[in-house]
């Protein structure tokens, strides 16, 4: 890898990319109907995007049987398509369930669920009481603990997700002394 941490497009295949992690390359592949959109400069802003939004230049596009002549993708529904991290790292709402979100690290999604019957606020990027979250088209879970106004019990709101204090390191969970956060490239991962 030419850089310590960054993302580079594969030189020949538009659906692939290389992640440089501590100077070591790791080959990644975008999901079905997605291509890698990035430049050759080791930045962290390259990402997998829908294929119709990407200019591959001299890189080869994979063949796709589901693509029609007008460029519209077949009949797959959003539930059939696995979640694709839209960027190198961050937190993103589950498109179907308001109580869930994806933690993306190096473009790899990890599905998480808000605790305490909280819902994920896609704007604030944290779990909050139900009455404070606009779910839009995402389904709200049903629970006996939810009140009719959507406010959850008396549990104080817990700031989720955790924000790393440093680029790398281990940090105690401020709410549970049996857990800690491992931060890599400023992206936290809860450990026990």
Image (cartoon, rainbow, N blue to C red):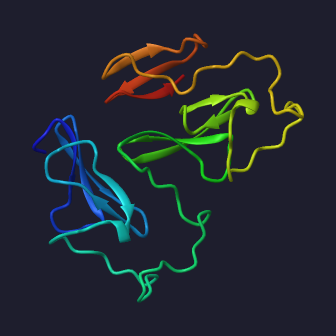
> Is residue 92 placed above or below 32 in the rendered structure?
above
Residue 123 point in image, percent of width and height: 55, 37
* Residue at 70 percent of width and 30 percent of height: 132
Q: Residue furthest left?
A: 2
Residue 129 point in image, percent of width and height: 72, 28
> Is residue 123 placed above or below 54 in the rendered structure?
above
Report the quarter where the N terminus lies.
Answer: top left
* Residue at 30 percent of width and 23 percent of height: 167
Residue 157 point in image, percent of width and height: 67, 19
> Is residue 184 placed above or below 19 in the rendered structure?
above
* Residue at 41 percent of width and 81 percent of height: 71
Number of labels in the image equals 0
The residue nearer to you, when weighing 44 against 184, is 44
Report the quarter where the C terminus lies.
Answer: top right
Residue 72 point in image, percent of width and height: 47, 80
* Residue at 44 percent of width and 42 percent of height: 104
Report the side of 48 relative to 73 (left or right): left
Report the side of 165 relative to 5 (left or right): right
Report the side of 25 relative to 188 (left or right): left
> Is residue 68 placed above or below 42 in the rendered structure?
below
Quarter holding residue 111: top right
């Amino acid at each position: 890898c030419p850089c310590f941490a960054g993302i580079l497009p594969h030189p020949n295949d538009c659906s692939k990319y290389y992640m440089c992690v501590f100077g070591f390359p790791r080959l990644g592949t975008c999901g079905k109907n997605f291509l890698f959109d990035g430049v050759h400069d080791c930045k962290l802003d390259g990402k997998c995007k829908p294929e119709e939004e990407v200019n591959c230049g001299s890189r080869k596009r994979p063949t796709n049987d589901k693509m029609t002549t007008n460029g519209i993708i077949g009949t797959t529904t959003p539930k059939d398509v696995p979640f694709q991290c839209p960027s190198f790292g961050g937190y993103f709402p589950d498109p179907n369930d308001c109580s869930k979100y994806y933690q993306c690290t190096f473009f790899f999604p990890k599905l998480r669920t808000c605790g305490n019957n909280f819902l994920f606020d896609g704007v604030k990027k944290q779990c909050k009481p139900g009455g404070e979250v606009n779910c839009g088209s995402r389904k709200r879970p049903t629970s006996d603990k939810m009140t009719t106004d959507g406010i959850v019990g008396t549990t104080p709101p817990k700031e989720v997700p955790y924000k790393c204090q440093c680029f790398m390191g281990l940090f105690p969970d401020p709410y549970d002394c049996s857990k800690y956060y491992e931060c890599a490239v400023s992206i936290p991962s809860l450990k026990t």
